[in-house]
Image (cartoon, rainbow, N blue to C red):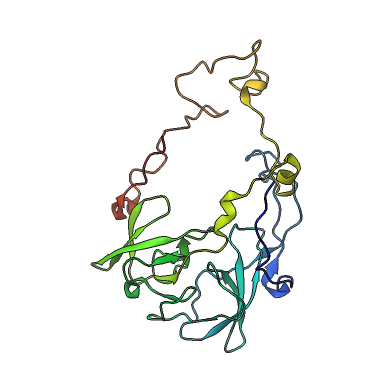
Amino acid sequence: MTVVDYSALSKNGPLKSLTKKLQDSAGRNNQGRITMRHQGGGNKILYREVDFKQAKLNVPARVEAIEYDPYRTGFIARIVYQNGYRCYILAAKDMKVGDSLIWAENAPLKAGNRLQLKNIPIGYFVYNVEMHKGSGGKIARSAGNYAEVLAHDAGYTDLKLNSKEVRKVSSDGFASIGQVSNPDWNLVNIGKAGRSRWLGIRPGVRGTAMNPVDHQRGGGEGVQPRGTRRPKDIYGNVIGGRKTRNKKKWSTKLIIQRRPKIR
């Protein structure tokens, strides 16, 4: 079992005014039927209201605390603006308590600062990127994630995402400099079944170990072959290699290079 190094986090708890309790559905719909398997249980957690828009421009802010967020893989930072307003934002890698930050159309190129994409030089890493101005960050928000600025042209900025996809986004949108905190999150080894249960993850069972009534691969004496050309889920939908993106989706024209196929 391995864990993330939490030594850089502040010792105080979350700010009560910025938290709320979300209803836990345990993977069930409004009729109580399971629509998403392997969910349920887990420790009680509070949702932190993170500000992805960061719309208070030209107002200096200071980092008050770096905190853990049970609803996301990266850490969050509690900041206080010069006018006294407090909120949570995604913490950048190596961000520390006491750091000064600012959001502006042409802010200094410092990790954590937020500015328009068209004012960010080629080669810089950015995170919490807006697809349109004012829409709030949508791209590169998980632990250790970032996008690389490749080019600016005709009102669009070319970004290389972590998946190796290259796509255009509006140059007027805002993005934060740097990468999301907690980059070692993907190295964590859960270690035991109980720890998965703490996280609200219930056990998954192989289909071939089930009865025929429960799964299309169930039943038989001993180990059986799949018996079908293409892998399918329990509902008969083809998985593993079937393209799921809508061919008529409007944003397809903004994708310059699709992410490479994993072999």
Q: Nearer the viewer, residue 97 or 225?
A: 97
Q: Nearer the viewer, residue 234 or 204?
A: 204
| Image quadrant in which you'd find residue 129 | bottom left
Q: Position of residue 91 (x, y in %)?
A: 56, 69
Rendered residue at 47%/76% (across/down) = 113
Can you name the residue that lies furthest to the top here? 221
| Image quadrant in which you'd find residue 9 | bottom right
Image height of 258 relative to 16, above or below = above
Rendered residue at 55%/69% (across/down) = 94
Image height of 218 relative to 156, above or below = above
Determine whether, in the image, residue 79 is placed left or right of residue 158: right
Can you name the residue that lies furthest to the bottom here? 83
Rendered residue at 71%/40% (across/down) = 202
Q: Nearer the viewer, residue 29 or 53?
A: 53
Image height of 56 relative to 139, above or below = below
Rendered residue at 38%/50% (across/down) = 164
Q: Position of residue 148 (x, y in %)?
A: 37, 61
For the C terminus, the quadrant is: top left
Q: Position of residue 78 (x, y in %)?
A: 62, 75
Q: Position of residue 112 (x, y in %)?
A: 49, 73
Q: Nearer the viewer, residue 244 or 76?
A: 76
